Amino acid sequence: MTVDLTAELAATRLLAIIRGTDTAAAIAAGTALLAEGVSIVEVALTTPGACDAIAAIRQAAPPGSLVGAGTVLTGADVADVAAAGAQFVVTPAVVESIGEAARRGLPVAAGALTPTEAYAAVRQGAGVVKLFPASVGGPAYLKAVRDPFPDIPFVAVGGVGLAELPAYLAVGAVAVGVGGPLVGDAASGGDLDALRERARAYVAATGGIPRP
């Protein structure tokens, strides 16, 4: 069954990005996020054992949740994450994995910073454009990039903390993607209770509702 990533992002307004140094800690962080109502979780392939983590988090995920892979660069990466059960892929740039994921029917959120890159990403098969790093230009830049592309769903990623989040949503971001400010060091063995507290704050701020 094909996932409508755009619709899910629009409904929850939040994508959690797990990037850590330990497989077991990444799994624990992912399951904690899902338990607190963060229903869309990405595990970056820079995390050791990322595919194992994706498979484990997917197995533990409640119905309606989405578990995907980030930092997906190549066609081989796409094959690996698809085998692990990833439901979507995220890239940091306009790279070859976009077309391969689209060919396989995996939704893609492709990283882009400029209008040219955003357009190229969509032409290659991305359904969502990840404005990255969003902090370079802030909400005003996102608005400027969106103006000529009102039909492209943009997710703001990079330097989006709780304080910045409302402004990105106000200028039309379909959602925000948050790594460090949300996950902290939990995916490297840090405090899971602190992670849960931050997760509740982000879910409240984005108006997200925990899935049944």
Image (cartoon, rainbow, N blue to C red):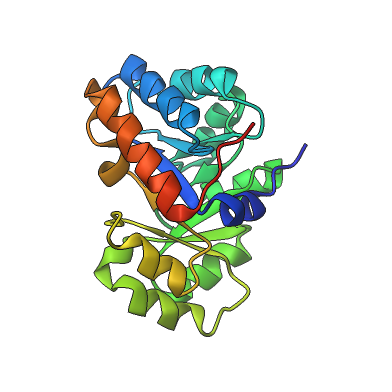
Residue toward you, 95 or 5: 5
Above or below, 188 against 110 in this view is: above
Quadrant hosting residue 134: bottom left
Q: Is residue 204 left or right of residue 135?
A: right
Q: Is residue 58 left or right of residue 14?
A: right
Q: Is residue 62 left or right of residue 105?
A: left
Quadrant hosting residue 53: top left
> Where in the figure is residue 132, as x and y percent of width and height?
36, 60
> Where in the figure is residue 97, as x and y percent of width and height?
53, 46
Residue found at x 62% / y 55% = 6
Quadrant hosting residue 152: bottom right
User: Residue 14, can we see it?
Assistant: yes
User: Residue 20, can we see it?
Assistant: no
Above or below, 155 against 69 in this view is: below
Residue toward you, 130 or 31: 31
Residue toward you, 100 or 199: 199
Residue found at x 45% / y 66% = 169
Q: Is residue 183 left or right of residue 33?
A: left
Above or below, 115 against 30 in this view is: below
The N terminus - image quarter: top right
> Where in the figure is residue 121, as x and y percent of width and height?
54, 63
Residue found at x 45% / y 75% = 171
